[in-house]
Image (cartoon, rainbow, N blue to C red):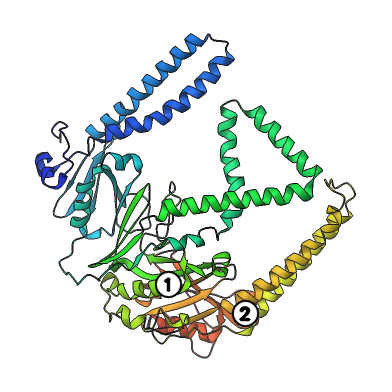
Amino acid sequence: MNAPGLRGQDRNAPEAARHRDGQDGWRRLSGRSLWVSGTKSLALVAGAVAGLTRFLLGLDWQPGWIVAACVGAAVLILAAVPAYDLARLRTTRWRLTAERLELRSGLTTRQHRSIPRDRVRSVDLRADPVLRMFGLTVVKVGTGEHAAEHTELTLDPLARNDAETLRRTLLRREEEREARDGPLAELRWSWIRYAPLSVWTFTASALVLGALYKPLNALGFKSVTSRAAGDLWGWIVARPLTAVPLLLAVNLAVGVLGAVLLFAESWGRYRLEHEPGRLRLRRGLLTTRSLTLELRRLRGVEISEPLLLRLGGGARVRTVATGLGEKAANETEDAAALAPPLPRDRAWRLAAEVAGAGGGHPAGVPGPRVPAAEVASAGVPVSRVLDAGAELIPHPLAARRRRVIRALLATALAAALAAVAAGAASWPAPWPWVRAWVWLIPVVVLAAGMWGAVEGARNLGHALGARHLVSRSGAVVRRTVALDRRGIAGWTITESYFQRLSGLLTVSATTSAGRGHYEVVDVGRGTGLDLASSAVPGLLEPFLVRGKTVAKQ
């Protein structure tokens, strides 16, 4: 159905929106998108002019002709990009009915997609600096399913007020509970000290150089980059005691600066609020992001403590929710992150409040709601904060023995490789002492392996609370997951040959949320089966034979 022609867009859009509705309620996207595409096309013009200039100089063109060609290319780009956007706007319509959100789009292949309103689980608002300049926002409406296709509609773009009105309309519920006084969490700039505590801080320079290598070569600087790389390597070989520490210091400084800037851009103006029936997360200094998550799709929380962050006293908090386990192919951010890296105690309190807030009944399964105040009572140890009265149960000593044996086997393999490397006379080495130092490799492997074995075994634990199954594991990255027992759809019992010799097994809870399954690793055979049987009564019982080692999926 054809919609009426493009009219002027009112920045105060909610009331004016009804006057722009076409027949049967079909509406256009915001016409200010043309200004956005024209502004963004300037970046394409800069790249095209640089590449065209280099190409024509290689053909010995006169400067006047080069300027004329570049002007022509610039005009063509500045006309083509808005023209394509205009065609996209004229062929795209959307409408919101009492039952569905519908979108018609496509220049050559027409598509008509729709989402039932009762299946809408999230509304994500995002605006980069150019969109914000013109008062626009990109709206992504998702159903919370894992499948990537046909589960999300994108309205690119809408006026900011229209986007907010659409978000409130889609997520409005008949049952309105009292909103919490104040936000669950709000940014404190002192948390920025945790930003550099990541492995990416030590690889930032290599990533930046790798990203710049191809563009510089395309612009004709290949000889310059090759000569610079050769000179740098020559300096390292000639003066390693000076060059290596200096380069490491420069790499660390660049990494710290990049981590701080990325933290500021990603988490600036961060605010997590508990609205009636949902959580709303807003953040972003330049590119603003707003994600609304329904509490009924929440299946638990995860606290992640990577080694560097753990040593600094910090942690990260993520949701375990349907549809947020996988990132889109073109996205680099973790959609399930609830907060930036923050102090460990604050992370545990936030996780407890979110776990308590998500007390709704998933998929209509009945069960009592546990208030956040009861879950996160003052003075309880961190091992009990996610489920009142739930102490983490340590795993058997056989779990540590398995890890120690693996560390010793890795050390033996490293020693064998070091012996081969040291005995190979033809092996090229830039410095004479390198051949002798290869024997440090098995020593480092032994120390790291034994630390990993002890730390990994110490971090193993599980608990069964009134509402959650809690599991913890990991040495380099320690993860504690509190999974809502009513969200568990099935069990997978894994028992390898070596686990069977040690009397251990791994219990994996299957769920539709997050990563899809969460494991209790290397638990005692009887304890693990009893844990699975008690967590969801009746689900595993038909496959258990008491008194024997029999378990099927």
| Element at label 2 | helix
**136 displayed left or right of 265:** left
Name the one closer to the observer, 151 or 494: 151
Q: Say which residue appears at 12% left-offset and 39% top-offset.
A: 20
Q: In this view, does 467 lie to the left or right of 135?
A: right
Q: Between residues 506 and 315, which one lies in front from this camera angle?
A: 315
Q: Which mark is residue 150?
A: none
* Among the two numbered marks 2 and 1 on one chain, the one whose residue lies closer to the N terminus: 1
Q: In which quarter of the image is the N terminus?
A: top left
Label 2: which residue? 399
Residue 355 lies, with reference to residue 330, above or below; the image says below
Q: Which residue is drawn at 27% across and 82% down?
A: 368
Q: Do the residues labelled 2 and 1 touch (CB within 8 Å)?
A: no
Q: Residue at 82%, 61% (x, y): give it.
A: 439
In this picture, is 484 found above or below 377? above
Decide: is 273 above or below 58: below
In the displayed image of the protein, which residue is found farthest to the front? 190
Q: Specify few, some or many for label 2: CA neighbours under 10 Å numbering under 14, 14-19, or 20 or more.
A: many
Q: In which quarter of the image is residue 38?
A: top left
Disc sitting over residue 346 in the figure? 1
Q: Of the residues shown, which amino acid type is indicated by label 1?
A: Arg
At numbered mark 1, what does the secondary structure look like: helix, strand or loop? helix
Label 1 CA crowd tier, 10 Å (few <14, some 14–19, many 20+): some
Count of marks placed on residues? 2
Q: Where is residue 182 in the image (x, y as percent from the top left)?
A: 27, 68
Instruction: Please state which amino acid type lies under the numbered disc 2.
Output: Ala
